[in-house]
Amino acid sequence: MKKKRLGKTELMVSVVGMGGIPIQRYDEKATLDTLIACQEVGINFIDSARAYSISEEYIGKGLKQLGRENFYLATKSMNRTKEGFYNDILTSLKNFQTDVIDLYQIHNLGKQEDFEKIFSEDGAYQAALQAQKEGKIKHIGVTAHIKEMAQQLIDTEKFSTLQFPFNAVENQGVELFQRAKELDMGVIAMKPLGGGILGEVAQNAIKFIVQNDLVTVAIPGMNTPEQVRECAEAAKQGSLSEAEQAELKKITEEIGKDFCRRCGYCMPCTVGIDIPGVMVFEGYIKRYGLSEWAKGRYETSAVKASACIHCGVCKQRCPYGLNIPERIAWVDHYFAQM
Ligand code: SF4
Ligand code: SF4
């Protein structure tokens, strides 16, 4: 697989990497099989997070068998304090069963108060610097979902990489990536399949990113060898043909921008509603004509959207500003009317 230089880190990473979110829902065997497939197709970049529960641990166990030296490891923590962030680095090292992590990122910076906090004397950035000095991590990166915040983070010139959403329906990052490139930062495209919404046209969605020179690596979530091979094939084919471009354009116009990326940042819900699980039904109803099937699935939910008490906690957490209580109420009402 083609490799690109991850900015000033000088790491030569595959243009498609393995996003470690979904493996937390599977097991060690699925992780190992996925990693083996990655090795076979030449994927050498893995991204995980402390927030992805067992993901780091499964990857660590897999790499024990496959050889840590064959992959670049990236992970991240949402801890904002020096002590908390440092402890998370130690936990990640233990989980990955390694002495050093190639890229450690401050995860999902969104609020201004968190920006101030991480750069304070007692903040996460100090912990990252200390761990870097001690040889526990090699490079420091950052991840964000909001353009203005990402811009502010780039402008600090304190990070080697930026991880930001980028896909055929969310291309607001292009300006940021241009600036990041000028500063020799590596650019990691998260949500290359729009949190699953582009899953039906996965290969074209991957090609769309790989052909963009501003992006270093796209990290679709992967948990099966088939997904790995599908992404690798797309990366190998390279640019989109005219017909593929037209097909992707048609789909992205239908989707628009106002959709749930299934990132889970809104969770946990105060009353236990599986918010991303309910939000996904919107697409099944509006786009795929699968209302009957979706209703059957919705009926097995442990807590229905009708249990929402409109506390607003989830809405504050959603980095995409979605009106979650209203949207899940619509889904519930739709199914009730059927
Ligand atoms: S507003 Fe409703 S869905 Fe959101 S956290 Fe509160 S109870 Fe849960
Ligand atoms: S509602 Fe918002 S925060 Fe929750 S999963 Fe969807 S995009 Fe993410």
Image (cartoon, rainbow, N blue to C red):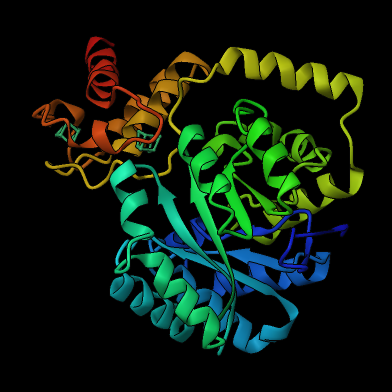
Residues 33 and 167: in front is 167
Measured as percent of width and height from the top left, residue 271 is found at 12, 41
Q: Residue at x 73, y 63 (%)?
A: 8
Tell whether 185 sits left or right of 26. Answer: right
Q: Above or below — where is 136 with respect to 334?
A: below
Residue 197 visible somewhere in the drawing: yes
Tell whether 305 sits left or right of 131. Answer: left
Identify the residue at the far top of this view: 337
Q: Residue at x 63, y 49 (%)?
A: 220
In which quarter of the view is residue 60 placed? Answer: bottom right
Q: Above or below — where is 93 with respect to 112?
A: below
In which quarter of the view is residue 316 placed? Answer: top left
Task: Pick the quarter of the image with the N terminus.
Answer: bottom right
Measured as percent of width and height from the top left, residue 149 is found at 46, 39
Residue 136 visible somewhere in the drawing: no
Task: Pick the quarter of the image with the C terminus.
Answer: top left
Q: Residue at x 30, y 20 (%)?
A: 327
Measured as percent of width and height from the top left, residue 333 is found at 23, 14
Q: Above or below — where is 144 with respect to 106?
A: above
Q: How many marks?
A: 0
Q: Above or below — where is 11 with respect to 3?
A: below
Measured as percent of width and height from the top left, residue 195 is found at 52, 39
Q: Quadrant of ligand 1?
A: top left
Tell whether 336 sits left or right of 144. Answer: left
Tell whether 59 sits left or right of 55. Answer: right
